[in-house]
Amino acid sequence: MSETVYIGIDLGGTFVRVGAFDQQGEMLAVDQAPIEARRGPRAGLARIISLIETMLAKLASQGKRYELAGIGFGSTGPVYPKTGVIDNPYTLPTWENVSIFEPLHERFGAPLTLENDADVAALGEYWMGAGRGVKRLYAVTVGTGIGAAFILDGRIYRGVNGAHPDGGHQMIDPSGPQCYCGLRGCWESLASGPAIARQARARIGERPDSLLLEMCSGDAAQIDARMVAQAAIQGDSLAASVMEHAAEHFSLGVANIIILFLPDRIATDIDVMVPARQVRIVPAQLGDYAGLYGAAWSVIQKVNGTSL
Ligand SMILES: [Zn+2]
């Protein structure tokens, strides 16, 4: 007898991850590769298909028989879940109006889903992580941007026309830095990794004795968020001030979410300074794999007739 296997895909601006899961949520295999978006969507999709083929072949070589029952795709947005189209030239240059359903269906013939990456990360935490069994889960993921998604009764909360409400672009400071979305002082332009690096670079002149200058070998353009966090831990006052500033802005965004949604739980990969009485703020549990779990679960739901 063969066992069913589901593939979850998490496509970001730099890497694509692929994971194989059973229906109970056990991750059977995981792999990743650079996406090199500039080489074009055709090359990118060929790479993704080859990652899946290699993974299925490896699983088959372990003696059990596996049958591919579905592929769930999570991608940095904008994405169109109904038509299976990714339209994201911002973080995936050249990926404009790209159908991912067509080539995947042609090669594998299995049921497919496509969701925004913040939504699949939240779904993953709901399925197998920090939000298990919770009626109202809000998930916040900080990286190159801020991903924010709301899961209500186990389903992705969708806006008008099925669009993903982009909580990462809630306005925190109208006099803040210009964001690529057109607004000023968005949450992710103040509290994401690149925002922290940008603020440290802009303020490095205030403190010629800062540890950061040593860390970047005198080239301020090389400063990244990881360096700023490390320098802050080592007691560097400039780095600590930049981190504190970002943390304050991050907490303002979380406070807005609490006011607007009053979720049972907020799962996040960042420490928060908001005093919350009813809402539990908990660390996310699945780390870099949250999106893979959620993508797999979205297609498991589809196969089982529970539309998200
Ligand atoms: Zn924005």
Image: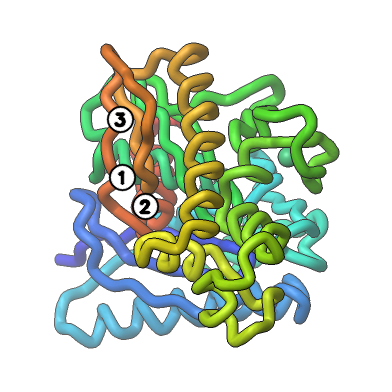
Which amino acid lies under the numbered mark 3 shown in the image of this protein? Ile
Are the residues tagged 2 and 3 within 8 Å (C-beta)? no
Residue wearing tag 3 = 281
Q: What secondary structure is marked by label 2? A: helix
Q: Is mark 1 within 8 Å of ligand 1?
A: no
Residue 66, how many percent across, how many down? 26, 69
| Image: 294 above or below 157 | below
**Left or right: residue 78 compared with residue 137:** right
Q: Position of residue 280 (x, y in %)?
A: 26, 24
Of the pair 296 and 109, the residue shown nearer to us = 296
Kindly identify the residue that appears in the image at 41 percent across and 39 percent down.
122
Q: CA distance from mark 1 to mark 3?
A: 9 Å
- Which mark is first along the chain, 3 or 2? 3
- 307 is higher (above) or lower (below) than 83: above
Residue linked to disc 2: 290
Quadrant holding ligand 1? top right
Residue nearest the observer in this picture, 170 or 127: 170
Crowding at mark 3 (Cα within 10 Å: few <14, some 14-19, many 20+): many
Disc 1 residue type (three-letter) = Ala
Q: Residues within 10 Å of mark 2 (few under 14, many from 20)?
A: many
Q: Residue at x 66, y 55 (%)?
A: 199
In depth, the one of 260 and 97 nearer the eye is 260
Q: Is there any visible trace of residue 110 in the rendered image? A: no
Q: Amino acid at mark 2?
A: Ala
Q: Residue at x 41, y 29 (%)?
A: 138
Q: Secondary structure at mark 3?
A: strand
Q: How is the image coloured?
A: rainbow
Residue topped by disc 1: 284
Question: Which quadrant holds residue 5?
Answer: bottom left
Q: Earlier in the sequence, mark 2 or mark 1?
A: 1
